[in-house]
Amino acid sequence: MEDIVEIDGCLHEGGGQMIRSSLALSLILNKEFRMVNIRKNRPNPGINNQLRSVFSAFTEKLPKVGDLEIYFYPKFL
């Protein structure tokens, strides 16, 4: 694969919509991405349970609640 796409979550809203859009584009384009500073500017930064569950459809390795960084490699089973 080509270079990883890196997304900084402290820009704009930095949460759910960025993660959902990144996952969708990653799957469509078959391109891996890394997102850092997830929800950094929020009172409770990092992955929450709702965002964590988004990954359950695409990978067995789920991020932990509170993680500020995720890495996703699209793999079709």
Image (spheres, helix red, strand yellow):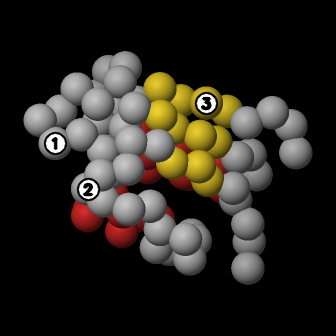
Vertical arrangement, residue 2 with respect to residue 75, above or below: above
Q: Give the labeled residue for mark 1.
A: 44
Q: Give the labeled residue for mark 3.
A: 6
Q: State if disc 2 and disc 3 touch (CB < 8 Å).
A: no
Q: How many marks?
A: 3
Classify residue 22 as left or right of residue 14. right
- Residue 2 image position (x, y, % from top left): 86, 37
- Residue 18 image position (x, y, % from top left): 41, 38
Vertical arrangement, residue 28 with respect to residue 12, above or below: below
- Depth check: give the residue in front, 15 or 43: 43
Residue at 51%, 48% in the rendered image: 70
Q: State if disc 1 and disc 2 touch (CB < 8 Å).
A: yes
Nearer to us: label 1 or label 3: 1
Q: Is any part of residue 21 visible from this angle? A: no
Mark 1 or 3 closer to N-term?
3
How far separated are the C-alphas under marks 3 and 2?
Answer: 20 Å
Q: Is any part of residue 70 visible from this angle? A: yes
Q: Residue lying at the far right in this picture: please name it.
A: 1
Q: Quadrant of residue 64?
A: bottom left
Residue at 73%, 36% in the rendered image: 4
- Depth check: give the residue in front, 35 or 20: 35
Classify mark 1: helix, strand or loop. Answer: loop
Q: Give the labeled residue for mark 2.
A: 48
Classify residue 54 as left or right of residue 72. left
Q: Residue lying at the far top in this picture: please name it.
A: 11
- Depth check: give the residue in front, 2 or 29: 2
Classify mark 2: helix, strand or loop. Answer: loop
Mark 1, Cα crowd under 10 Å, few <14 / some 14-19 / many 20+, is: few
Residue type indicated by callout 2: Asn
Residue type indicated by callout 3: Glu
